[in-house]
Image: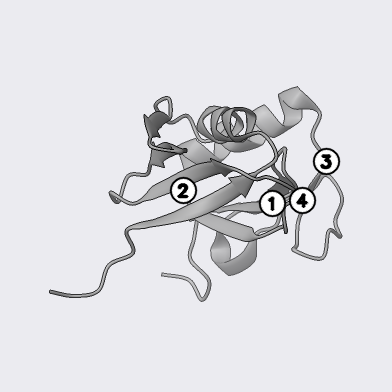
């Protein structure tokens, strides 16, 4: 069997708020409670398992390949919510998107301070 990514734990200041923010931003089904986690299933079968953190959360980076239509939804929600977003991971190009590799990309923060990225073309192009 080839190695496949299955799941990861996403520590959150408020697991419910973070999981719902994520499902809203990416137009995904509601999270499902699984033990101490709120699991969000992605299209390729892996899950993000949101866990309540007992203290501070160290920010992580999570990048997602999305369709052009999904990107429109994500960017639309960012704009509707008035969230700061950036064209690059150094938080430059404030409230702009990028057009790297012939696609579109955007970086923004979730409620726990994790760096989320949505891109329409993988790094290096197709």
Do we see residue 67 in this rendering? no
Crowd around label 3: few <14 · some 14–19 · many ≥20 (10 Å):
some
Q: Please, is residue 41 above or below residue 57 in the view?
A: above
- Residue drawn at x 55%, y 50% is 10
Separation of residues labelled 2 and 3 (CA atoms): 20 Å
Residue that badge 4 annotates:
56
Circles 2, 4 touching at the beta carbon (< 8 Å): no
- Count of numbered labels shown in the rendering: 4
Q: Nearer the viewer, mark 1 or mark 4?
A: 4
The kind of secondary structure element at disc 4 is: loop
Residue that badge 3 annotates:
84
Coordinates of residue 18 in the picture (x, y in percent): 62, 35
Residue that badge 2 annotates:
66
Coordinates of residue 105 in the picture (x, y in percent): 63, 54
The kind of secondary structure element at disc 2 is: loop
On the rendered structure, is 37 left or right of 51?
A: left
- Residue drawn at x 48%, y 71% is 125
- Residue drawn at x 76%, y 56% is 87
Residue that badge 1 annotates:
114
Q: Nearer the viewer, mark 1 or mark 2?
A: 1
Separation of residues labelled 3 and 4 (CA atoms): 22 Å
């Amino acid at each position: 069997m080839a190695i496949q990514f299955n799941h990861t734990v996403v520590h959150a200041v408020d697991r419910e708020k973070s999981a719902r923010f994520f499902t809203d931003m990416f137009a995904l089904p509601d999270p499902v409670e699984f033990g101490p986690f709120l699991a969000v299933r992605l299209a390729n079968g892996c899950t993000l398992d949101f866990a309540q953190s007992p203290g501070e959360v160290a920010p992580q980076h999570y990048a997602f390949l999305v369709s052009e239509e999904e990107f429109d939804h994500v960017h639309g929600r960012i704009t509707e919510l008035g969230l700061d977003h950036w064209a690059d991971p150094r938080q430059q190009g404030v409230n702009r998107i990028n057009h790297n590799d012939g696609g579109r990309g955007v970086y923004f923060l979730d409620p726990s301070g994790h760096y989320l990225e949505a891109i329409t073309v993988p790094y290096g192009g197709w």
